[in-house]
């Protein structure tokens, strides 16, 4: 299941995200979206977890959690959002 993680602090790293989600199950991938011009985080990421049950547990555990001073939002990624990213 592909998850969309929004409202990330600009300081949050891909390694931190990987560790947070790995605590709830198997990770297939973690992709922190970066600004091509500045090299800084855009404040959102995509995380893929192959097991739906583990992904749902991660959503419940991490949605609304304060990470690096930002209350993150975690939900199942919609197809339109992932297609938008692929187009960039």
Image (cartoon, rainbow, N blue to C red):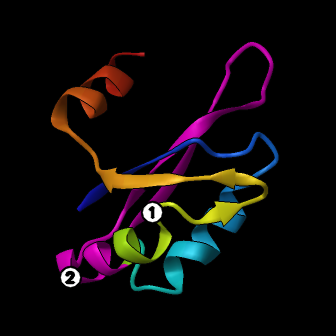
Q: Quick check: is 47 in the magenta stretch?
A: yes
Would you name the residue on which mark 1 appears? 63
Marks 2/1: CA distance? 15 Å
Q: Nearer the viewer, residue 63 or 14?
A: 63
- Residue at screen point 66% across, 56% down: 14
Left or right, 65 with respect to 24, comes to right
Whether 55 is drawn above or below 73: the answer is: below
- Image x and y of residue 68, in percent: 78, 58
Sequence-wise first label, 2 or 1: 2
Left or right, 16 with respect to 46, comes to right
Which secondary structure lies at badge 2?
A: helix
- Residue at screen point 27% across, 45% down: 77
Q: Nearer the viewer, residue 71 or 8?
A: 71
- Image x and y of residue 38, in percent: 80, 18
Quadrant showing the N terminus:
bottom left
Left or right, 77 with respect to 65, comes to left
- Residue at screen point 70% across, 66% down: 16
- Image x and y of residue 9, in percent: 73, 45
How crowded is the residue under tag 1: few (<14 C-alpha within 10 Å), some, or many (20+)? some
Would you name the residue on which mark 2 appears? 53
Which secondary structure lies at badge 1?
A: loop
- Residue at screen point 29% across, 29% down: 81
Left or right, 3 with respect to 12, comes to left
Whether 44 is drawn above or below 84: the answer is: below
- Image x and y of residue 54, in percent: 29, 82
Read off the magenta span.
28-57
């Amino acid at each position: 299941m592909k998850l969309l993680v929004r409202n990330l602090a600009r300081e949050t790293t891909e390694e931190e995200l990987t560790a947070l989600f790995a605590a709830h199950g198997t990770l297939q991938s973690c992709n922190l979206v970066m600004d091509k011009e500045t090299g800084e985080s855009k404040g959102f990421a995509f995380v893929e977890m192959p097991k739906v049950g583990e992904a749902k547990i991660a959503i419940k555990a991490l949605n609304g959690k304060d990470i690096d001073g930002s209350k993150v939002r975690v939900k199942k990624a919609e197809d339109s959002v992932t297609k938008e990213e692929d187009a960039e």
